Image (spheres, rainbow, N blue to C red):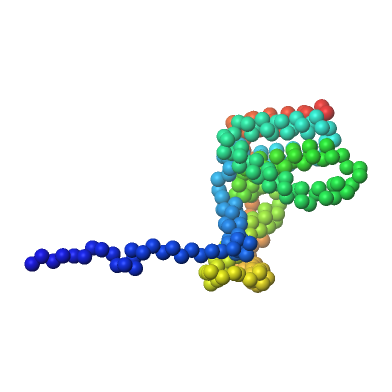
Amino acid sequence: MNMQTNTELPLWLQTKNQTNLNFEKKHDFVGINITSLGKLLHFFTNITPVYRVKTSPWLRVCTLLITSLLVLLSRNLIFLWACLLIILGELALFPGNAILGIFKKYLKLIIFTAIFILPSLFLSQKADLALFFMRISTLLLSLAYFSGTTTWQQFILALKQLHFPNVLILTLDITVKYCYLAGIYLQESLYSIRFKTLGQKASFQLLGNLIGELYLSLKSRMNDLYQAMVLRGYKLTNKNHLYPKFTRADLFPLIKLGLICLLFWWF
């Protein structure tokens, strides 16, 4: 006896669901904040920079500090223009994707700086605009280059190699980690709000509640961390055995730093 098996799907599985959930973009602040928090968390957990360089992290920190100090002290446009050309010449050796990523950081820094500085600058009648713009452009490009080639982990390692105060390093390290924890907690809260208000508009009054819950959560975590450190007898007495080390890749940055110092002395 032949048994025929019906292989056709039921009718309710054959019909395509054409139901679309229409969200108004101007009210979807939950989705916008989730996306922003995702980028922020990626920034804190990213262990690969925009472009991986072989130079030592401590040398990159020293180059950034010394270059920034000389740029702030100089009032010569030729020196500032020379520093800008040196940084741009070094960026020209990078791949196209790395250059694009660094210049994106550079544009973000320019926009952030312009919001806070330009209003007061135009109100001042004695400001030298040419000198100011050259100085800010050089500083921000140097900072974007450093940010694009150095991660947070490498920055903390560089501070340890340069023997910065342990209290400063510990405070900075804990701050970065708790910013990450705050982002995780806030992202989970926003996801729960989005799931509960699916198809509806989220109220802006939730923002105050989220900030309050975030503050109480972080305060509780910090108290727990402090109590744990007290119980374990933590006194910042650990000796730092990290020291700066030179490699072959550090030769070119040293020459560049020496050239910038020579130009500052010359002009």
Q: Residue at x 59, y 39 (%)?
A: 98
Quick one: 113 or 68, which is closer to the camera?
113
x and y percentages locating residue 172 in the rendered image: 67, 55
The answer to whether any part of residue 231 appears in the image is: no
Split into 4 quadrants, where in the image is the C terminus?
A: top right
Q: Quadrant of residue 255?
A: top right
Q: Residue at x 63, y 31 (%)?
A: 92
Relative to 27, does residue 96 appear above or below in the rendering? Answer: above
x and y percentages locating residue 73 in the rendered image: 83, 38
Quick one: 58 or 21, which is closer to the camera?
21
x and y percentages locating residue 107 in the rendered image: 68, 44
Q: Is residue 170 left or right of residue 120?
A: left
Quick one: 202 or 147, which is closer to the camera?
202
Q: Residue at x 73, y 28 (%)?
A: 259
The answer to whether any part of residue 133 appears in the image is: yes
Split into 4 quadrants, where in the image is the N terminus?
A: bottom left
Relative to 104, does residue 257 appear above or below in the rendering? Answer: above
Q: How many marks?
A: 0
Q: Is residue 223 left or right of residue 2?
A: right
Q: Is residue 211 left or right of residue 17?
A: right
Q: Residue furthest left?
A: 1
Q: Quadrant of residue 50?
A: top right
Quick one: 117 or 56, which is closer to the camera?
117
Q: Residue furthest top?
A: 266
x and y percentages locating residue 119 in the rendered image: 83, 50
Q: Residue at x 88, y 49 (%)?
A: 123
